[in-house]
Amino acid sequence: MDAIHIILPDGKVQEVPKGTTPADIARGISPRLADAALVARVAEPNDGAGELVDLRRPLDHDVRLQILTEKDPDALFVFRHSAAHLLAAAVMELYPNVKLGIGPPVDTGFFYEFLRDEPFTLDDLAKIEKKMHELAAQDLQNERKLMPKPEAIELYKKSNQVFKCELVEEKAVEPMVSFYTTGKFIDFCRGPHIPSTKRITAFKLMSVAGAYWKGHEGNPQLQRIYAACFFTQKELDEYYTGWKRPSAAIIASSARSWICSASKTKPGRD
């Protein structure tokens, strides 16, 4: 089998079989690092920038490799992105008819956008949060899958996920489209993600806000669920202590107004 060379942060070089993953390298360095690893950064041997990749991504040529843990801010960004997928997975289990928008990480957590006829209430947020914890405890794997672009579009057309279909048509420039699965949930996403859901425990669904699809007035108006998310419960508690949740009446009233406004808005062309 062909060998490749992996340059570690301390300058040491490991010769390993082609197809070795960052997770394999971490396990070879120490069990403690393997347990703490969340994501990896790879770069060309003469390029200091590089990109973030899954720990399971096979390496097929010589690279510089850094294993990222909770100590690295970039790992928190990826962690929160994976938590956003967990939110969407929970919502889809509880409310399977919702339409999915986007779900990026933000400075203190993440959000995900949904199109739903009924407004999300505080009771809904509590149910969703409970379902998220249930799914996280199942240690669901975040697995990357590739499929041809026409097949990806057809997947979303069949499930009537009009916004995701639009995103694939616009954003997928390669013949093979990147998806991630979290249990039964599948999402168009370039990643990377942390290996599984088991580490995602310190999160709190904070509020619901209205947002026009792609930020353009005149597009359908979605409900954006915001969440705080940190590596530890202590960090979450410290953040939550200084934050004041809007009252249930305000959330319900605002959500109803967003839904009514959205129902009068004619969807734009996909």
Image (cartoon, grey):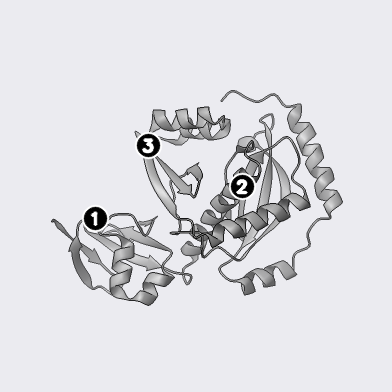
Camera-side residue: 49 or 209?
A: 209
Q: Which quarter of the rendering shows the C terminus? A: top right
Mark earlier in primary sequence (1, 2): 1
Q: Which residue is mark 3?
A: 147
For the residues labelled 2 and 3, say whether their Cβ atoms are less than 8 Å apart: no
Q: Amino acid at mark 1?
A: Gly
Q: Is residue 176 left or right of residue 88?
A: left
x%, y% of residue 161? 56, 32
Image coordinates of residue 144 in percent, x first then y, are: 40, 48
Q: Earlier in the sequence, mark 1 or mark 3?
A: 1
Local crowd at mark 1 within 10 Å, few (<14), some, or many (≥20)? some
> Is 266 placed left or right of 196 in the picture?
right
SS for dot 1: loop
Q: Amino acid at mark 3?
A: Met
Q: Residue at x 68, y 72 (%)?
A: 238
Residue depicted at 51% across the width and 34% down the height: 167
Does residue 1 sit above or below 26 in this rendering? above
Considering the numbered disc 2 on the image, is that residue within a helix, a strand or a loop? Answer: strand
The residue lying furthest to the left in this view is 1
- At a point 68% along the width and 68% down the height, the residue shown is 239
Task: Name the residue that disc number 2 marks.
Answer: 112
The CA distance from mark 2 to mark 3 is 24 Å
